[in-house]
Image (cartoon, rainbow, N blue to C red):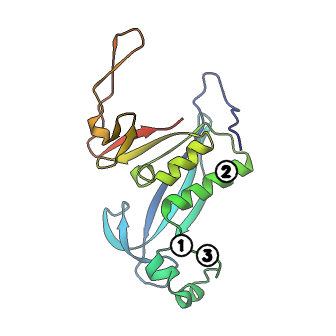
Amino acid sequence: MGRRRSFSGDRASPALVGDDTGFAKQGRCSAGVQRQYTGTTGKITNCQIGVFLGYASSRGRAVLDRELYLPRDSWIASPERCTAAQIPEQVGFATKPQLLQAMIERALTAGVPFEWVTADAAYGDNGPLRCFLESHQIGYVLAVSRAHQITTGVGKVPPTSWPARFPRPDGSACHAAKAPKANDATTGP
């Protein structure tokens, strides 16, 4: 699938936005519920995690797609628990980045016009997701953790070690933006 560019001019380029969120739960019968970290509460708590694909353009924003994250050990490895929660038998384990990739694939198949994808470090640290985006010539801005290693022409380096100045073809210096303390960003095609 080649990239199609359906938007141009002075309007902001439409983007797909990936993120997950937690839904606090008290019991253990709702599909996907277990004790796990959620940014919603900022701690490990009993919750479900949903992965969402949003769409943002100069004309507005919308949620395009969503997937429920089903933990491997407490759910997928327990067929009787999945059956009781009415999870179809053919549903297997998928990481959050794999769920996001599946939703991006559906957006491509549906012909959703977008220029790039953005997400936080939970997705930016995932090499297979970045490779998928690059193989489909999809531009991206993904945060990466400070410990993440980025492969450059000089080898693997953490994003915090990038030089503060980059030479321009005319020999003058271009100053790089300072990276945030918690996460840094990497970009794709």
Label ID, residue 91 = 3
Front-most of residues 31 and 105: 105
Identify the residue at the far front of this view.
154
Q: Is residue 54 left or right of residue 175?
A: right
Give me the residue at 66% from left, 26% from top. 8
Label ID, residue 144 = none
Q: Nearer the viewer, mark 3 or mark 2?
A: 3
Q: Is residue 61 left or right of residue 148?
A: right
Helix, strand or loop for disc 3: loop
Give me the residue at 37% from left, 42% from top. 150
Which residue is label 2 attached to? 107
In 3D space, how far apart are the residues under numbered discs 3 and 1 (Cα atoms)? 7 Å
Q: Which x, y percent locates residue 158? A: 30, 42
Identify the residue at the far top of this view.
170
Q: Earlier in the sequence, mark 3 or mark 2?
A: 3
Which residue is label 1 attached to? 93
Q: Which x, y percent locates residue 10? A: 60, 22
Q: Quadrant of residue 86?
A: bottom right
